[in-house]
Structure formats: structure tokens, C-alpha cells
Image: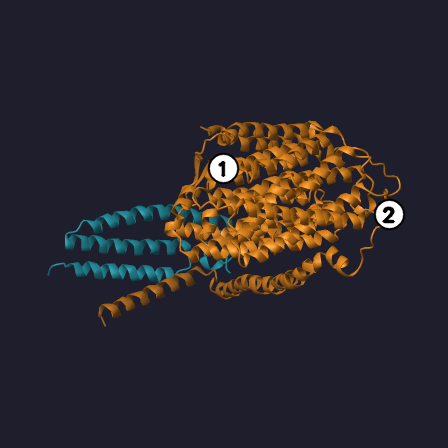
Chain colours: A cyan, B orange
Amino acid sequence: MTVTVTWYLILAAGLFSIGVGGVLIRRNALVMFMSIELMLNSVNLTFVALSKDLGLIEGQVAALFVMVVAAAEVTIGLAIIVAIFRRRSSANVDELAEMKG
Amino acid sequence: MVDYLWLIVALPLVGFLINILFGKRLGEPLAGWLGFSLVGISWLIAFVPTVDFLFGNTNAETVFYFEWIPMLGADVAILWDPLASLLVMIVTGVGALIHLYSIGYMHGDPRYARFFAYMNLFIASMLILVLASNFALMFVGWELVGLSSYLLISFWFAKPTAAAAGKKAFIVNRIGDWGFLVALMIIFATFGTFDFVTIFTTAPAILTTGVATAITLLLFVGATGKSAQIPLYIWLPDAMEGPTPVSALIHAATMVTAGVFMMARSAVLFELAPSTSVVVAIVGAATALFAAVIAVTQMDIKKVLAYSTISQLGYMVLGIGVSAYTAGVFHLTTHAFFKALLFLGAGSVIHAMAGEQDMREMGGLRKKMPITFVTMTVGWLAITGIFPFSGFWSKDEILAATFERGGPWLILWVVGLLAALLTAFYMTRLWVLTFFGKPRWAEGTHPHESTWTMTVPLMVLAVFALMFGWFNTPARLAFDHFLAPSFALIPHPELPPIGTIVMLATLALIIAVAGIAWSWNRYHRADLPVEEGGFWEDGLNAFYVDDVYGRVIVAPGKRVSEWFAVTVDPKIIDGAATGIAHGVESFGDELKTTQSGRVRGYAAGIAIGGILLIIGFLILGGGF
């Protein structure tokens, strides 16, 4: 039984769904953040898998881009979460609604 | 080579800048002498090349300085031809004399330097107007003289009547400017340029009679505004609220002739539109007569002269209408001299009478003011058309040209003669009431002759008012030859045979003498005729033309403006603006409830949106 590209896509879809579920269900900002990272990396997986399958380099380039942007995003996102945690010693996103319209 | 001609315009402009910036520090009388000398130098600079035209130089020259609006063919350039040089001579020559006169006349005015600044600005603007080599630049000068006229009429703006008169002059002139501006648009649409030489040389080939008629009629609308013709003459009598030197310079000698000058400049276009010429001639003759009738009834010495100016401008316009362009310009020139003289003389009288302008309060000034009396007598003889004073030659030339046309034009000739009769009548009335009879001065008035700065201009102008006509006698048409290069593109009008000329001149002379005798008998007596009620009252109110305009045009205009101010602006315009703002606000109010602040709610929204997108793409791609 050979491992075809479909397997990778199914794995990626699964990872992505877990990520979406994490974001939607969990209240802790840090965990939500990790879930987002999971979604990003599942997409990376599809990029790389299809890149290999189709013999095109662009998918890997896109994956590299996503990694760089994700790294930047993590830096800022963690900084914000840490700042919030320091002020209210909690990272519960449901308590953060001061900016509502 | 006349490259240096830009100096003529630049010098008065420099005077304007110096006087408006540092005038207070210069003080009296230095500010006046500065203004006078700069205009005088301008005159000197223009004098030599003008003499050059007199001695056979017939080449008009265009002096190019720089491109202004290349797209419109509007350069800053001077068209130096005999017509322009003549106007420059009048504007700077008469202008300098009036500046000199003002040094004495404006003595003691708190805004002495400001007066000379405005006067210099006017001279510079008028020179731009007459020297322009294209319609666009001419229009710049045209508007600038309107501005300086406004500033000078309302110079004593603390007086409400003066402020109102300035506004009236400006607004009425704007109506004329509308015609001029539309004419310019049609000219540009037809020729693709504003350049005089190009337009006038190509006009006969390009213009159809219809377009030529439209252009010239609209140009004439502009001229009726500036040159105070029916129906736009109403601003000129009110303009007498300005200081008397202003009336002499702007509202008698120079600016009001701008319309006549502009039509003479566009003579080629007017020659292509015979029906416009008919309109021009009729309006000119009607204005000449109508204004003369009003002048008969006026009591204010300046008002008489103002209506007289309108009447004389009517003669010039009549001259343009009968294609006697040189005659029109000739009358413009002689009128500049004798009317400036009359105004300055009137100013001298008013000055002596401590501001009194009502002729009923004057009388017997002959002995007290000998120089003013003698010089004004010359002006009086010139305007009534007595041989050999200048008005005789120029007015007769226009009337002869009208007579020569024959047929229905004879009506206009008769109208012109009637106006001449009335001119003799009202001018004699003015002359007698002012200088003869018993003194009727108010208590405490001590008339005296004016200072030399005021009498010298009177004497110089008197010499010109006496002699200038001799330049263009039927025996020797020096003035015609001088101007000929400017009118080379149109057929030269034939003079009537010499017998007819002599007959016409004799007739005009008899009429003038009759008018004088009639008036002399009526007013040179101890008990002055009572002039009240009926005709006199109607005339004094200028036959209520202003009231009619007020009711027919101004009042509805005000009502429309009020409607716009009260209804359209706050309700419709502001309503639309605030309505949009209110709409945005309430929409925002609705929308902001979705901004719940719950991050996971947003995330759910994004997820649902993503799922919907996937479903949509699957449907579109045929996956279902």
C-alpha cells in the first residue's frame, strides 16, 4: 500500500479541523493560539504535499512564507497575551470585551 | 524696436506697490508726487515711439514677452500700433495731469497715499487693456480697470452712498463682462486663438455672418457695460460719489472709453456683421439723446457732467455703428481732453465751495476763480461744438458719417443733432449757473482760486481742448492717416463731398449756437426759472430707470436669493448633507451590536464563513 498525496490531505484536513475546534471551544487564549498554529501548519502540510506531488516548487515557497509570517505573529501574539495575563492574571478571552461596540 | 514698452505698464505698477506698502511713511505730498512722476515717466517713454508713428512708421509691432497660457494662444505681449499708442498717450498724459491735480485736491485726506496707490493701479490696468496683443490679456486689463474703478468710487467708503455706488458700478459692469466673456469663448471656439493679428487677418475667410453677429453683439454687451450705454449706463451717474479726479480720469477720459476702444480694435469683426452695426448705431444715438435730456434737469454739477459723458459716449458708439471708426476714436480723444478739463474744473469749483455740488448754491464765481472760469469756458465751447474748438471737429465727423449713409440712417442723424442742441443747452446752463449771476453761496463760504498744482492741469487740458481738433480737419486728415495702419484691414470710409461737409458743419454750428442762446436767455437773469415738478422732477430722478430696474430685476433677484438662502440652502443642500450623516450614524448603530467583544464568537463567524465558502466553491465546481 503506497502512501499517496490523498493521505497527506486527509491528515491535513484532520489537523485543521482540530485547530478550528480548539479555537472555537477553548477559552484560554494560549491554547487558542496553539490551535491557530496547528491550522497554519496543517495548511503548510498541504502545500508541501501537493508541491511534491505536482513537482512544483511554489508550494514549498508558500510554506516558507507561512512559517516566517507565523513566527512574526507568534512574537506579537504572545507579547499581547503576556501583557494581558500580567494585568488580570487570567487569559480567559471571554472576559476581554471592553472594546465591544 | 520697442522692447522697452513693458516699462510703461511696470512703472505705475511699481508706484502702486510702493504707495500701498510704504504710503503712510511717505506721507503727503510725497506719495502724490511719486504717483505723478511715475505716470509722467511712462508718458515720456511712450512718447518717442508714438511720434515715430506720426512720421511715417506704419509698422504695427507685436512685442512678445512670455507665454501665459499657451493652450489658449494667450501670450503676455504688446500690440504696438497707432491705436494703442494713441490710447497710451491719453491714459498716461491725461492721467499724469490728473495725478498732479490730485496732489492739491486730495490735500488733507487721511488716506492720501492709498488714493495714489489706487490711481496708479488704475493706470497700469488701463495700459494692460490698451496694449494687449490678444483678447485674453485685454480681458485681464478690462477686469482690473473694473476693480480699480470700484476701489476709487467707494474711496470714501464711510459714506454709505459711496460704498453702494462702488458696488453698483462693479455689479453692472459684471453684467457687461458676461457678454464679453461669452464673446471670447465663441471667438476661441471659432479661431482657436485669442491673438488679435491672427483673428483679424483670418476673420473674413473663417467667419460666417451669423457667428460674426453673435460675437459682435456679445462684445457690444461688454461695451455697453464699460462705456455706459443703454441699458447698462445706470452705474456712471452714481460713480460720481468718488473723488472728482477719479470722475475725471476714470469716468470721463479713460476707462469708460474702453468699450469704444475695444470695438474699434475689433473693427474687422464689426465690419462682418452689418446687423450688429445697426444695433450699435441705434443704441449709441438713443443713449446720446436720452442722457442729454436727463443732463438738462440735473442740479448737481457732477451729475450734469456724468450724464453728459454718457451722452458723448453715445456719439462715439454711434460713430462705431456707422463704421466711422476713426471718427469715433477721434471723438474719444477730444472728449478725453475736454471732459477731463470740465470735470477738473468742476472739482476746482467744488473745492472752492467747500464741497458744495448743487449749482443752485453757486453763481458769480467768474471773478473769484478766473483761471477755472477761463479754462472751463474752453471746455464748454469744445463740448458744445463751437468752431474751432476740438468738439466741433470730432462730433461733426461722426454726424457727417451718419448723414452720408442716407436713408433711414438720417433718423439717427437727426437724433444726434437733437442731442447736440440739448448738449449746448445743458452745458450753457451749467456754465451760467456756476459762473454768472449773483452769488448764491451758503453762509460762511469763501470761494478762492485753487493752487497751481490744480490750475496747471486745467490750463494744459484747455490748450488741448482748444487745438486738438485741428489735427483732423476735412482739409487735412492727419489723425485719420495716423490711425490708418490700425484700420488697414477694413475699407476706408469715404468722406462726403466738401460742400456737404460745410453745409452739415454750418447746420451743427447753428444748432449749437441756438442751444446756447436759448439757455443763456433762460438762465442769465436775476430771477432763475423755477424748475420743479413734471418733466424736471422726472428728469432729476433720471426718469425712474433705476426704480424700474430695481423692481423688475433687483427685487426678483433678491427674492430668488432669499428663497435660496432660506429654503434651498438650509433645507435641501444642508438637508442632503446632514441626511447622509444621519443615515450613516443609524446604520452604524445597528451594525455595532455585532461587535460583541467575544473573541470566540468572531472565530465562529470566520469558521462558518469559511465553511459556506467551501460549500459555495463545491457547488460552483460541480462537486455536488
Amino acid at the residue labelled 1: His
Indicate the chain on which mark 2 is placed: B
- Can you give x and y, in whole percent of width and height, for residue B265 in the image? 49, 44
Q: Is residue B356 left or right of residue B583?
A: right
Q: Quadrant of residue B617?
A: bottom left
Where does label 2 land, which residue?
B526
Circle 2: element type: loop
Task: Looking at the image, tell me whether mark 2 or mark 1 is earlier in sequence order.
Answer: 1
Tell me: residue A30, above or below residue B469.
below
Where does label 1 land, which residue?
B481
Q: Quadrant of the N terminus of chain B?
A: top left
Residue at 48%, 36% in the rendered image = B81
- Can you give x and y, in whole percent of width and height, for residue B57 in the image? 45, 31
Label 2–label 1 contact, CB within 8 A: no
Amino acid at the residue labelled 2: Ala
Q: Quadrant of residue B39?
A: top right
Circle 1: element type: helix
Front residue of A87 and B125: B125
